[in-house]
Image (tube, helix red, strand yellow):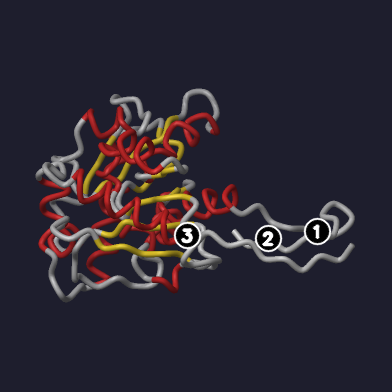
Amino acid sequence: MNERRALGGKAIYGAAVGILMLEARFPRIPGDMGNAGTWPFPVLYRVVRGATPERVVREQARGLLPAFLDAAKELVELGADGITTNCGFLSLYQRDLAAHVGVPVATSSLMQVPAVQALLPPGKRAGILTVSARSLTPEHLKAAGVDPETPVVGTDDGREFTRVLIGNQMELDVAAAEQDILEAGSALKAWHADLGAVVLECTNMAPYSRALSEHLRLPVFDIVSFITWFQAGLRPRDFGPPGSAPRPWRER
């Protein structure tokens, strides 16, 4: 029977991923998680007031958990089937957020590190590039399931990238930001001869993944690769018949 029923229960349909955003005004170029054009699928956004880059990165998001829990719950009530955030340092809230909202939660790009490590041949290991190596603690890594001995290098000493993002500046020299990331990547590879792949902690680094991969001649994994995978699990692709038989319409 050709049923044509629709089931409700959500305020917004068609967007499986909900993104918790820091309160920031720096430029978000294509490839940045906060640029909606980055995604080949619809997403929902919610800005968490008071969650500035300085507070989340430098101050370990102290005092912000209730605001993040409320914002995540609102995204789920709107229609999100999974939650992520736009700062890798929020791995500290992974367990709390997942317990609170009752749907899959992927707080940090760092959560890719164990999987990337498992992909590599013996004798090779994954390394991490971050916006602030000085602020990324073993607690951040452990909360994401990452070995605290994983190599980490930051763009802290660069000219542009960290200064603009953590300082929440209104203008970004994109070429200089890219150079900061390439130099940090070169340092990571020079200091760790066994480097086999790079995971970008900072969600704002994704626009430069291609340049970094070509520069290092290594695989690079970022928040876009992670959340694209996440979305694929929340909304598996329908390949059509014969594997997908006709069925009643049910929006999720």
Q: Is residue 20 left or right of residue 196?
A: left
Q: Is residue 200 left or right of residue 238?
A: left
Q: Please name whichever residue, 60 or 178, is drawn nearer the observer in this view of the structure.
A: 60
Question: Which amino acid type is shown beneath numbered disc 2?
Answer: Arg
Mark 3 surroundings within 10 Å by alpha-carbon count, few (fewer than 14), some (14 through 19), many (20 or more): many
The residue that appears at 53% across and 66% down in the rendered structure is 13
The quadrant of the picture occupied by the C terminus is bottom right
CA separation in Å, label 2 and label 3: 14 Å
The quadrant of the picture occupied by the N terminus is bottom right
Mark 3 or mark 1, which has the lower sequence index?
3
Whether residues under marks 1 and 2 lie with C-beta atoms below 8 angstroms apart, the answer is yes
The residue that label 1 is drawn on is 247
Q: Quadrant of residue 136?
A: top left
Q: Secondary structure at mark 3?
A: loop
Q: Quadrant of residue 152?
A: top left
Residue 96 at what x, y percent from top left? 30, 36
Q: Is residue 224 left or right of residue 48?
A: right
The residue that label 2 is drawn on is 250
Residue 81 at what x, y percent from top left? 50, 52
The residue that appears at 41% across and 44% down in the rendered structure is 106
The residue that label 3 is drawn on is 79
Q: Please name whichever residue, 202 or 125, is drawn nearer the observer in this view of the structure.
A: 202
Residue 227's place in the image compared with 160, above or below, is: above
Q: Quadrant of residue 38?
A: bottom left
